[in-house]
Image (cartoon, rainbow, N blue to C red):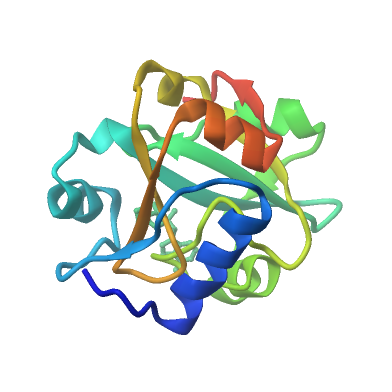
């Protein structure tokens, strides 16, 4: 952990403050690039890691954010029903363009423009969850209700 945050992590810390959350972004000594890595680094269950996954509407080309429990695979058919169009996994450039962050560090907030967001209902089972904070070593701890508040996301069954 470091007191001085990198530029990308600092951007997330500022976004949290703007949203009125007292969460602290921490940069770990070990990688948090994948949900499994993040769980090992912070010492929690993989289920408690918030994966911020970007999908693309095949017709609209718009970005859709799904924040999912670290162990769950998003069911694209269910997501397609929610957004009323087929969806696909975009390439890394699209993710960076729409979120302002690179894969492995995409946070659930702090994007250039707010993204339509769906929250995996399984995340609500835990009192504490951890999300990526801008780069593949940065994370922050929050509650599921904080996650709902800061993303304005719709809680759904998505796996
Ligand atoms: N920092 C960790 C834990 S919070 C993290 O960001 N995990 S993640 O699951 O949210 O981000 C990695 C995800 O990015 C993968 O699950 C995968 O869905 C996506 N991804 C990885 N590589 C690519 C790629 N080449 N193109 C598009 N998406 C990718």
- Examine the rendering and report whether any part of residue 102 can be seen: no
Name the spot of residue 95 as percent of width and height, x first.
60, 67
Q: Is residue 94 left or right of residue 1?
A: right
Q: Is residue 69 above or below residue 106?
A: above
Q: Is residue 66 left or right of residue 25?
A: right
Residue 18 vs residue 71, the one in the foreground: 18
Q: Is residue 74 above or below residue 116?
A: above
Identified at 15% across, 67% down, the residue is: 30
Identified at 68% across, 45% down, the residue is: 87
The quarter of the image that holds ligand 1 is bottom left
Q: Is residue 6 left or right of residue 97?
A: left
Q: Is residue 100 above or below residue 145?
A: below
Residue 17 vs residue 117, the one in the foreground: 17
Residue farthest along the right direction in this orientation: 60
**Quadrant of image for the N terminus:** bottom left
> How many numbered discs sit on the rendered protein?
0
Q: Quadrant of residue 97?
A: bottom right
Residue 120 vs residue 55, the one in the foreground: 120
Q: Is residue 110 above or below residue 130?
A: below
Identified at 78% across, 61% down, the residue is: 113
- Examine the rendering and report whether any part of residue 55 can be seen: yes
């Amino acid at each position: 952990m470091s007191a001085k945050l990198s530029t990308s992590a600092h951007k997330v810390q500022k976004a949290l403050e703007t949203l009125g959350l007292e969460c602290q972004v921490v940069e770990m000594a070990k990688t948090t690039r994948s949900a499994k890595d993040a769980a090992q680094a912070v010492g929690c269950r993989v289920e408690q890691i918030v994966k911020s996954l970007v999908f693309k509407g095949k017709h609209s080309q718009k970005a859709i954010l799904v924040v999912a429990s670290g162990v769950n695979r998003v069911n694209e058919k269910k997501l397609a029903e929610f957004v009323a169009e087929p969806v696909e996994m975009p390439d890394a450039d699209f993710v960076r363009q729409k979120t302002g962050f690179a894969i492995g560090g995409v946070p659930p907030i702090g994007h250039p423009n707010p993204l339509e967001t769906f929250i995996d209902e399984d995340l609500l089972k835990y009192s504490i969850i951890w999300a990526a904070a801008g780069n593949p070593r940065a994370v922050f701890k929050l509650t599921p209700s904080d996650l709902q508040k800061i993303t304005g996301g719709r809680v759904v069954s998505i796996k």
